[in-house]
Amino acid sequence: MLPAPYLLYLGDVTDQIQVKTSRGVAVWRPELCVGQYRLPGSGVDLGLPEMTFAQARAVGAQTLILGVANVGGVMGQGVIADVVAALDAGLNVAAGLHDRLEDVAVIREAARANGVRLFDVRHPPSGVPIGNGRPRAGRRLLTVGTDCSVGKMYSSLALEREMRGRGWNADFRATGQTGIMIAGDGISVDAVVADFISGAAETISPARDDDGWDIVEGQGSLFHPSYAGVSLGLLHGAQPAAIVMCHDPSRPHMRGLPARALPSLAACLEANLAAARLTSPDVQAVGVCLNTSALDEAEALRLCEATAAETGLPCQDPYRHGVARIVDRVQACFATSAS
Amino acid sequence: MLPAPYLLYLGDVTDQIQVKTSRGVAVWRPELCVGQYRLPGSGVDLGLPEMTFAQARAVGAQTLILGVANVGGVMGQGVIADVVAALDAGLNVAAGLHDRLEDVAVIREAARANGVRLFDVRHPPSGVPIGNGRPRAGRRLLTVGTDCSVGKMYSSLALEREMRGRGWNADFRATGQTGIMIAGDGISVDAVVADFISGAAETISPARDDDGWDIVEGQGSLFHPSYAGVSLGLLHGAQPAAIVMCHDPSRPHMRGLPARALPSLAACLEANLAAARLTSPDVQAVGVCLNTSALDEAEALRLCEATAAETGLPCQDPYRHGVARIVDRVQACFATSAS
């Protein structure tokens, strides 16, 4: 669990895409963010107070979120120097890079010298068990997708927000590095050893008996030949009572594979439900989330309506329309009440 | 690739199960085995000439196969001393334990001092790529299963032997530690990082254009909630033209999960074919292999006949009956000819 509150690192990054993790934390956990740290020349702004490491520490910040990415996930010398300065100011540091903070000697030594901690969220913890598939208490909703990067994390967080807004107990369960930074906890399931995929999913969404929901962040797609093993293990381990299908209608082909078409929504729903029944025999589909950012408002609404008619499920763009209709369907199917 | 020929290590093991890897190499690659090394008190015998490390080296042995297992895959002090002695005699050493040979300082140093190599076959090589699912040349047959440990490796090796006996080009492609020791090559797919499962399968069975077959060793089962992700990634990466279903009719429940029944053969065949079509649209099932060791000869034959009638596929116990009928079916379906 990452100690909050946070200072969000932007560094000298000028590209919005490169700060997507810091931005995600600012958007979804604003109550945990005390400020942002930028270098001269940075072109991005999360709208938080500008702070030095010492200023952030003085107002109570516990952890610097190194929520920036660059090619290959490697840290440059400037970033390393900033991390050491943050540690020297008494902040813990969390990063989601391929390079481990722990593996950089000056960083490791600065953490030890200052009595603070390093969190490499891309790297799974040790001791993840083998999955067992035994039925467990509680209700879980898993977002699944026709492809990678179609909005599963965003949709999951929107569902958590909508449920909490209705007074339900609901917890986003993170399975990827950006999600883990936002949740402050989780396991990067695509980084565990293959035998432990379903065990990782079981670990992050343990039994619960408070009539609440775990909203488990999906990964990949059963139809993506590079990553379907991760998606299937996650589906079995999450043991979902409900699934929400995420889709990007503007995607011309499976991500990274120009020759490969996306599956139909119907085929993708059916395959996910069939596979999910192994550990959750009564699983139901409760909605479709579309990323309609390539469409104008009228087209977006028309497509959501057509998709709802085609699938028999509520269909919304969570960014444009929220997910109220999908949560209405959850309520209708599961008689979930405010706690 | 493990340098052959081999000396097989039995040590002081008294339990047949604990030498299953050494036995597998002796049974399936006898032409590569020059001898066995036993300590006083060992109760097992592979029928090979007894040799010291120096004697084995003198008759040309290149590698000591440490094909023994004990609880937890940990090496005792006696085994470590034997490994060092083998290295000092000029042998390479290959092991399939959880503990890495490389991680034991005296072993690492002895290998370096003697200019010989260590092979930790349970641990995947670095540089395995992400799978891409692109169609590749050549024909691959994958063994799949209703459960773990139902004879997929044995069936694969029997298929290779039968095909080679007919003059076909055929190569067993190993995906587990025992298989890798037998093949001398391969990747332990359940030990790769989850994102790389299908990439590992693509790597071990590259494109071929000699009208031959790769026989890819299956792992786990799409119906085992602990390991199905591995099975699916392997299915997608192997891109099989043909699958053979392996089953143990005496198994009371899924391995390790007393409350979970095995799937029907029909359901398991259909699920594997449906999933395999993502990367191999014309995939066909060509046979069923049963492990009938719990039955008498007449019962075994009756069950094979009943299973063949039920599935419309040739059904044999590879240990009792061989796999000739299944390879006949491969020949009928694919017009494979001797090269």
Image: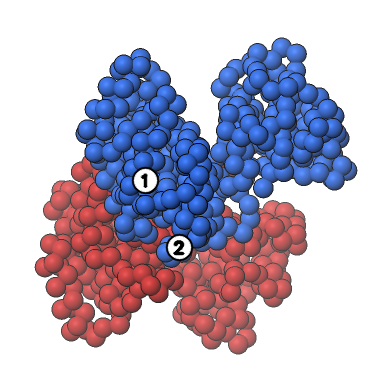
Chain colours: A blue, B red
Packing grade of label 1 (10 A; few <14, some 14-19, many >=20) is: many
Q: Going by the image, does B24 lie left or right of B158? A: right
Query: Which chain is mark 2 on?
Result: A
Dot 1: element: helix
What residue sits 22% from the left and 55% below the top?
B270
Mark 2 or mark 1, whichever is nearer to me: 1
Query: Are both tags, 2 and 1, on one chain?
Result: yes
Res. B124 mark: none
Give the amino acid at mark 1: Val
User: Label 1 near label 2: C-beta < 8 Å?
Assistant: no
What residue sits 20% from the left and 51% below the top?
B284
Q: Residue B112: where, in percent of width, then height? A: 72, 54
Dot 2: element: loop
Q: Nearer the viewer, residue B49 or A211?
A: A211
Q: Image quarter for residue B81? A: bottom right
In the picture of the structure, the residue carrying the numbered disc 1 is: A330
Q: Residue A299: where, in percent of width, then height? A: 30, 17
Q: Nearer the viewer, residue B70 or B225?
A: B225
Q: Nearer the viewer, residue B28 or A240?
A: A240
Total numbered labels placed on residues in the image: 2
In the picture of the structure, the residue carrying the numbered disc 2 is: A136
* Location of residue B99 with respect to A145 vertically, above or below: below
* Location of residue B223 with respect to B307 vertically, above or below: above
Packing grade of label 2 (10 A; few <14, some 14-19, many >=20) is: some
- Any part of residue A19 in sight: yes
Q: Residue B338: where, in percent of width, then height? A: 21, 51
What residue sits 33% from the left and 47% below the top?
A332
Marks 2 and 1 sit apart, C-alpha to C-alpha, by: 19 Å
- Any part of residue B169 in sight: no
Q: Residue B295: where, in percent of width, then height? A: 26, 83
